[in-house]
Amino acid sequence: MGVPCVRVAREDGEATRQRLAEADLVDDGYDITVADGSLYVPVTDPTAVPDAFDVVEFDAPVREGQTMPADILGVDPSYERIGDLVIIDEDDPERARTIADAIVDSDLPVEGVLNRASKIKGEQRVRDWEVLAGDTTEVVHREYGCAFELDLAAVYFSPRLATERHRVVEQVREGEHAFDMFAGVGPFVVPFAKRGATCVGTDINERAVEYLRRNAERNGVADRITAIHGDVREVAADYTGWADRVVMNLPHSADEFVETAVELAGDDCVLHYYDIQPDEDLYGPGERAVRAAAEPAYEVTVETRRTVRSYAPGEQNVVLDVRLRR
Ligand code: SAM
């Protein structure tokens, strides 16, 4: 099975290993390996590796004497890592217990195991959790060189969106004004601010805004982020025509907020519009909603249509990058 590894020239190997170890990213479950003149250092979280490094999938051997959950269970269980917590998604309580015990008894560096106990629900998009090991739902998660403190039981956060967020982050220019209408704990605005943007993030969940402020401090960008607790529809009036970029990551009801996004837009603004739609017409509803709200005051150009991930059978989570030019 391929393991995410940082690939470096052999002569840079020890310096690289040290840097990754300082960031707590070296995966001790696998051997550091030399192949084809390069050194492969296994990493626990590829999305947290700084951009300067080359991350590849490599068939690194399991370290002799290391016990993985699959060695205990006889099958490879499906799980997700967020910081030093492991998340599983098991309906059968007995199976959930068995997998959690195997994860704890393995050599994975883990502080706790959580099972999904409900769907994501309500306006604040938070789910219930069953704590199967450890005693907390709080975690510090690293993503593309930023650290995010959060409580999974109090706020929305999905590590699965890391690649999509990074795609958007890479478009951000120094000095631009970026507004995240549904900011959560800051996984868009914190890296935006690190690239030199001036950012505003709003969220209706007060706990999310508290974490957003802490994460802005933790990542050294508090001076470039204004975090506001409230309904974005009420906050927007203070930022009319302000934004060069607007992020709308509330996929089930984005269409109800397009007028607000247009109110925030400056003369030349990119809107990142997230949506969930059936395979038959993935992008049409979003494009029509934006055109209805923005035309004729703005010229509307859809610059990107992209599927972020599969949401359910026959339904996809998609994004449109739409430029509005007045
Ligand atoms: N952007 C974050 C991320 O990627 O992790 C959070 C996205 S989450 C899907 C949507 C967020 O929108 C939630 O944190 C929720 O509390 C917030 N929200 C929902 N309705 C809102 C509103 N009317 N005004 C501001 N925030 C709202």
Image (cartoon, rainbow, N blue to C red):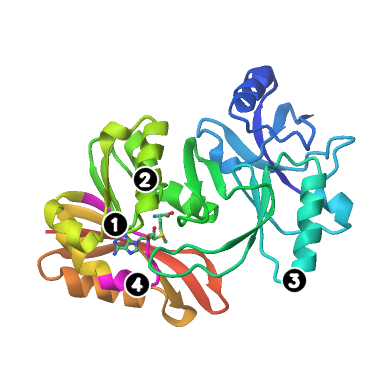
- Look at mark 1 in the image and give the residue it sits on: 181
Residue 119: x and y in percent read: 54, 70
Residue 214: x and y in percent read: 39, 38
Q: Are marks 4 and 1 in contact (CB under 8 Å)?
A: no
Q: Which mark is residue 210?
A: 2
Mark 4 to mark 1: distance in Å? 12 Å
- Circle 2 sits in a helix, a strand or a loop, which is it? helix
Residue 170 seen in the figure: no
| Cβ of mark 4 under 8 A from ligand 1 | yes
Q: Assess disc 3: are there few (<14), some (14-19) or many (≥20) residues with their C-alpha within 10 Å of its C-alpha.
A: few
Type of the residue with mark 4: Ser
Q: Nearer the viewer, residue 59 or 74?
A: 74
Q: Tell which tag, 4 or 3, sits nearer the viewer.
A: 3
| Cβ of mark 2 under 8 A from ligand 1 | no
Q: Tell which tag, 3 or 1, sits nearer the viewer.
A: 3
Q: In the rendered structure, which disc, 3 or 1, sits on the residue that comes first in sequence?
A: 3
Q: Quadrant of ligand 1?
A: bottom left
Q: Residue at x 51, y 30 (%)?
A: 52
Q: Tell which tag, 2 or 4, sits nearer the viewer.
A: 2
Q: In the rendered structure, which disc, 3 or 2, sits on the residue that comes first in sequence?
A: 3
- Look at mark 4 in the image and give the residue it sits on: 253
Residue 94: x and y in percent read: 79, 67
**Residues drawn in magenta:** 244-256
Residue 120 seen in the figure: yes
Q: Nearer the viewer, residue 321 or 134?
A: 134
Mark 3 to mark 1: distance in Å? 37 Å
Q: Are marks 1 and 2 in contact (CB under 8 Å)?
A: no
Is 18 covered by the magenta stretch? no
Residue 210: x and y in percent read: 37, 45
Q: Are marks 2 and 4 in contact (CB under 8 Å)?
A: no
